[in-house]
Amino acid sequence: PWQSDPNHKFDPYGERGIEIVPSTNMMVFKKELQTASCTINENIMVIHRFFDENNKTSEMKIEEFLPQRIYGCEVIITNVSSFSQELQCLWQIPQGSVPLKNSNYQKSNSLTLKPYTTQMYEFYFYFPKTGHYT
C-alpha cells in the first residue's frame, strides 16, 4: 500500500533544511535531535566496541580506521536493576564512513529492557577514502 513516487522534488533549503515539492499526496515524518539536560541512570550499562569484519572475535583495539576495509560496531546495553527500563537508543556510524549490510548513517529506536537483561546491536560501515574526520 505504501509506495514512493519518484517524481517528488527535494531541494536544499537554507543551510540545514530541505524543501519538498510532492507530485502526489505525501506523508512526512520528522525527528529532530536537541540538546537536553538529563540525569544519569546508573542501572543501565552501555558498552561498544569496533571490530574488523574479518577478525570479529579479536580483542585487539582498533586505533584507526583504514579505507576500503569493512568495520563493525557492537553495542551492548544491560539493565542491572530489578525493574524494567524504557530506553531510547541512538547510534551513528563515524563521520566520513558509508553504511553497509542494511545499516544506516544514524538509527534511533525505543526498547524496554526487562530486569537483569542485555540487548545487543551491530552495525557495519567502511571508509571509501582516507581523510581527517571529527
Image (cartoon, helix red, strand yellow):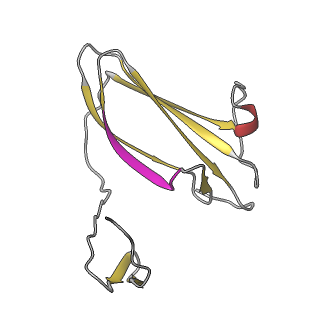
Q: Position of residue 66 (x, y in %)?
A: 76, 50
Q: Position of residue 120 (x, y in %)?
A: 47, 30
In the image, is residue 43 part of the stretch drawn in magenta? no
From the viewer's side, name the closer residue of 4 and 73.
4
Quarter of the image that includes the C terminus? bottom right
Give the prevailing secondary structure in the magenta stretch: strand
Relative to 30, is 76 above or below?
above
Residue for point 51% across, 56% down: 105
Q: Position of residue 2 (x, y in %)?
A: 33, 65
From the viewer's side, name the closer residue of 19 and 32.
19
In the image, is residue 108 part of the stretch drawn in magenta? yes
Residue for point 28% across, 69% down: 28
Res. 41 image quadrant: top left
Relative to 96, is 16 above or below?
below
Relative to 8, is 46 above or below?
above
Relative to 35, is 7 above or below?
below
Residue for point 33% across, 86% down: 23
Res. 50 image quadrant: top right
Quarter of the image that includes the N terminus? bottom left
The tally of labels here is: 0
Residues rendered magenta in the picture = 103-111
Q: Position of residue 47 (x, y in %)?
A: 49, 29
50 sits left or right of 30 in the view:
right
73 sits left or right of 129 in the view:
left
